[in-house]
Image (spheres, rainbow, N blue to C red):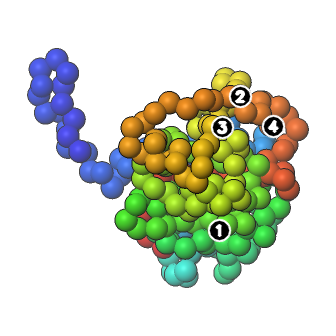
Amino acid sequence: MLLFSLETAELLALIHDFSLSAIRVGATTGVANRALAKKNSTIVGLFGSGNEARTNLEAICAVQPIDKVLVYSPTKEHRDRFAEEMTESLNVEVQPVTSARAVVKGADIVMCATNSSQAVFEGSWLEPGQLVVTIANSDGVHRRTEADVTTMTRSDLIVLNNIETAVNNQQRELLDLIDQEKVSWDKVCELGQARPGARRCSCRTKQRSGNHLLQEQHRGWHPVRRRRCADLRSLQETGLRTRAAWGMVRRGSQRMDG
């Protein structure tokens, strides 16, 4: 990435995307966790042990009083090294675990930061009050998701970076469920409406036959009628996140080592 001066057009810096991209994604995760996670969340269940896992965990620890992290990735050497390094870096207990289920059990926040093309845990394992954050999604060519259908359908609130991007990128892991009426647009919101200080979350509500609305958004960016969704502040106060009382945030696609 090149950084130029707006005043002189002088080249000021060459920034490697490997580092900058992970910081950007981690920052978005921090915003989402500050807005949507339970107040005073203390335990993170983390999938992944690469670059994205590091920056996303750092962001979560910056906005929540985390005192324990349970981390799992398929390679034991990777997760053990990650746990040792991040324990020292964050002054937080980071404990490697040997199964995906151990990551989810008892966690306040379930953070997925992997390069997986398939779900990394079963939605039936989720417990009341948990917030799920994922960074992988389909892009129209490659189908990817870190969350399974059960996670999607149980969610009371699904927060995207940008709805139009999800439609244009053909993120079928969500759009197929909407087409099948297993998930409603009524519970899909954008992160901009979920940030601290934003009292309302706007949701797309107008649909036509089949997936016609989605095709319209893809081709012409046509405006659709919008209405208010549930007040996020009320959601935080009551602790409601899904039908089982937890929430989910969908993130843009990024890759990392497992």
| Residue sitting nearer the eye, 124 or 18 | 124
* Residue 135 spot, x, y in % from top left: 52, 56
Element type at mark 3:
loop
Which tag is nearer the camera, tag 2 or tag 1? 2
Neighbour class for label 3 at 10 Å: few (<14), some, many (≥20)?
A: some
Q: What residue would you read off at disc 2?
A: 228
Residue 255: mark in rendering: none
Q: Which of marks 2 and 3 is nearer the N terminus?
A: 3
Instruction: Give, as a three-letter code, the residue at label 2.
Output: Arg
| Residue sitting nearer the eye, 86 or 206 | 206
Instruction: Give, as a three-letter code, the residue at label 3.
Output: Thr
Element type at mark 2:
strand
Which tag is nearer the camera, tag 3 or tag 1? 3
Left or right relative to 166: residue 66:
right
Neighbour class for label 1 at 10 Å: few (<14), some, many (≥20)?
A: some
Neighbour class for label 2 at 10 Å: few (<14), some, many (≥20)?
A: few
How far apart, in angstroms, are the residues tagged by discs 4 and 1? 23 Å
Element type at mark 1:
loop
* Residue 96 spot, x, y in % from top left: 64, 73
Q: Earlier in the sequence, mark 3 or mark 4?
A: 3
Mark 3 vs 1: CB contact within 8 A? no
Residue 15 in which image quadrant:
top left
Q: Which residue lies furthest to the front in this view?
A: 209
Q: What residue would you read off at disc 1?
A: 148
The residue shown at (66%, 81%) is 98
Q: Earlier in the sequence, mark 3 or mark 1?
A: 1
How far apart, in angstroms, are the residues tagged by discs 3 and 4? 20 Å
Residue 205: mark in rendering: 3
